[in-house]
Image (cartoon, rainbow, N blue to C red):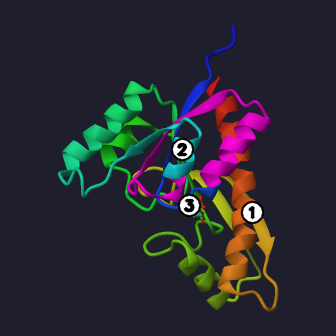
Amino acid sequence: MSSRKKNLAVFCSGGGSNFKALHQHIQERNLPCQIVMCLSNNSQSGAMQFARENGIDAVHLSSKVVPEEAAFAQAMLSELEKRQVDLILLAGYMKRVPKAVVERYPKRILNIHPALLPKFGGEGMYGINVHRAVLEAKEKESGATVHFVDEHYDEGEIIIQGKVSIAPDETPESLASKVLEVEHRIYTEALVKVLEKMN
Ligand code: GRF
C-alpha cells in the first residue's frame, strides 16, 4: 500500500536558491513529497516571493512579530501541525529553531551548511564568512553538508556531503558559487535518502 506523499516545510531567510532547486527536483523526479509551506523571518525574501508565485503557503514568523519565546515556538508548531508537516528543511534559515520544535521533530529537521562539517561550523560560520575561513585555513577542498538538526545545531548526524576543489586563485565569492551548486544537488539527494528511510 503506497503511503501518502510526505509534506515538507522549508525555512528560509534569503533568496531561497536551495528552496527553488528542491522544488524543481521534486517535480522533475516526481519524488513522493510536496513542499506545503515556506516559513521565513523575512516576508519580503526571495524565497517567500517564490512561494507566493508557486502556490506554496508563505508563512511569515519573526521574533519581531512574536517576541515571547514560548509563543513563538507555539506559533511555529501550530503552522507545522495544521499542514501535517513530516519533514522540515532549513534552507538558508538564519534563525534558531526553538528547542520545542527540534524536540517535536527528532531526525525530521534537515539543514544545509556550506562547508565540510564538522569543520567550519558553529557560531558565526554562515554565508561568505565560511568560505573566507576555509581559504584562510589554506584548505585544499571544501564543499557542503546536509545534516539532521539537533539541539547542538551544526553537530547533528551528517546525511550527505559534496566536495569541491579549491583553485590557487580561489576567492571567497568564487568558492561560494561553486559550493552553492553542490548544495543544490546534494540537498535533493539527502531528501531522497531520508524519504526512503521513512517508508
Ligand atoms: C546557502 O549557502 C546555505 O548553505 C546557507 O545559506 C545559504 C542559503 O542560500 N545555509 P539560499 O537562500 O538557499 O540561496
Tell me the quarter of the image containing the C terminus: top right
Q: Earlier in the sequence, mark 2 or mark 3?
A: 3
Tell whether 73 sits left or right of 128: left
Q: In the rendered view, would you say 166 is above or below 84?
A: below
x, y percent for residue 32: 69, 27
Q: Which residue is under mark 3?
A: 15
The residue at 69%/59% (across/down) is 183
Q: CA distance from mark 2 to mark 3?
A: 11 Å
User: For the residue marked with disc 3, what is the amino acid?
Assistant: Gly
Q: Which residue is under mark 2?
A: 51
Residue 148 appears anywhere in the view: no
Of residue 89 and residue 198, the one placed in the foreground of this image is 89
The stretch of residues the image draws in magenta is 18-47
Q: CA distance from mark 1 to mark 3?
A: 14 Å
Label 1 or label 3, whichever lies nearer to me, is 3
x, y percent for residue 79: 36, 34
Q: Which residue is under mark 1?
A: 181
Q: Is mark 3 within 8 Å of ligand 1?
A: yes
